[in-house]
Amino acid sequence: MAAGEVGGGGGGTATVRSLQETPTWALATVCFMFISLSILIEYLIHLLGHWLKKHKKVALYEAIEKLKSVLMQLGFMSLILTVTQKSISKICIPNHVADTMLPCRRTVDTLTGKLFRRLLGGGATRRERALAAAAAPAAGTDHCGSKGMTSLMSEGGINQLNIFIFVLAAMHIVYSVTTMGLGRAKMKRWKNWEKETQSVEYMAANDPERFRFARQTTFGRRHVSTCAANSTPQLWIKCFFRQFFHSVAKVDYLTLRHGFITAHLSANTSFNFQKYIQRSLEDDFKAVVGISPILWLVVVIFLLVDVHGWNAYLWVSFLPLIVVLFVGTKLEVIVARMAMQITQQSTVIKGAPLVQPNDNFFWFSRPQLVLQLLHFILFTNAFETAFVVWVTWQFGIKSCYHDNIEIIIIRVVLAITIQFICSYITLPLYALVTQICMTDGG
């Protein structure tokens, strides 16, 4: 039989019709809508890629291609789940194993069991007999239930997992666009500073024949103090709070610009450093839009520890915040260390302060390690938001996932805060500092 019947709330039956009993106009309409939408999205992405290539935005074009690859990967995952869902649902496990590490407190099956026991004992009411009759056909069609076992994952659960993959893909796109948008917004302020370097006032203030005490320069006064220079903990505390207020000051930008040009471009004072850093940000963006196997492993671990009563996702929400603040502080410390290096090398300097490129300021002398941490932060944050959206969409605001509304509010606020700090503060600062410190200049 192609169609089944499901009991309705009013005592009637609702027919579930297969494609054999679906009007051809309905099938054609749905297919036309999905095909048209898919072609439209593909065409828009093609136009965006063409525009980026035309304007020589090579890094952003490669980032779009990488994002398409990620979406294709998610699409294959969804397709494989759809094709194999019947086979997966027929994998049976013992009931006591199925009742371990549940994300929600198990109540439905327990109540159903009590209901059948009361029915067998003759103490069930008419309503309870109706509920038992409604549950019986479903149990009879359950492959694993007929064996006294539980399915590894039901077909309904696999469909919900498919929807989660869609939400994760959507959030990944939203967060990627937001990351680039906030980073470019931060760098707009630097454009005015770059124009200022061509003014007569700037050239006079940075006369290469002028002698000054290193500590008396604006860059020296901002970063070098007796307490911070002699105490590493005080330096880190100072830099921790600095990232929230003027993470990149005008004097920092101009000094790092001067150091980069001196190290790599000799006396080319007309070089547009702001555009160069913006392209560097685009290169960094290309690196953070992908999903590596390690990040997929992180997803599996997060799904594994989502056990009722553990509140694992609350603590997971704080992990990206801790990492992004730690990375931001480290970048501020690097700038301060460069200022201290100038004062330690010479008491008096000639011209503008000259910072020295050095990879050793970074952990293990690897600037790319910081970018990998930022990649982890952005992806983890996107996953966190996707999970909140998914459980709200699938199970409602009153589901067991939302038992404590205060925790949900904290998670949402943390996700927004982390995205802003990482995209607007930390990533642009990383793009600036790494171009100065990397000895190869790229």
Image (cartoon, rainbow, N blue to C red):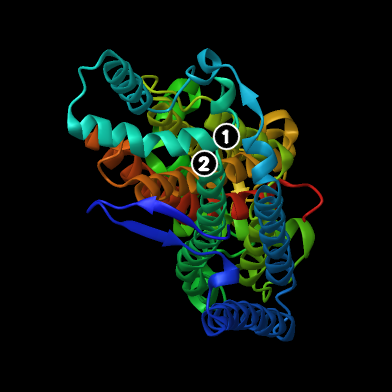
Per the image, the residue denoted by label 1 is 153
Q: In the image, is residue 213 above or below residue 113?
A: below
Name the foreground residue: 211 vs 152: 152
Q: In the image, is residue 413 above or below residue 98?
A: below
x 54%, y 78%: residue: 30
**Disc ID at residue 157:** 2
- Residue 136 lies left or right of residue 155; in this view the side is left
**Disc ID at residue 347:** none
* Whether label 1 touches label 2, CB < 8 Å: yes
Residue 192 appears in the figure: yes
Distance between mark 1 and mark 2 Cα atoms? 6 Å
Residue 371 screen position, x and y as percent: 65, 45
Q: In the image, is residue 272 above or below residue 336?
A: below
Residue 326 appears in the figure: no
The quadrant where residue 207 appears: bottom right
Secondary structure category for the residue under label 1: loop
Residue 361 screen position, x and y as percent: 66, 35
Given the image, on which type of amino acid does mark 1 rest? Met
Secondary structure category for the residue under label 2: helix
Q: In the image, is residue 197 above or below residue 323?
A: below
Residue extending furthest toward the front: 122
- Residue 141 lies left or right of residue 78; in this view the side is left
x 55%, y 56%: residue: 166
Residue 259 screen position, x and y as percent: 67, 55
Quadrant into which the C terminus falls: bottom right
Name the foreground residue: 330 vs 107: 107
Given the image, on which type of amino acid does mark 2 rest? Gly
Count of picture labels: 2
The quadrant where residue 198 appears: bottom right
Residue 67 screen position, x and y as percent: 67, 62
- Residue 392 lies left or right of residue 29; in this view the side is left
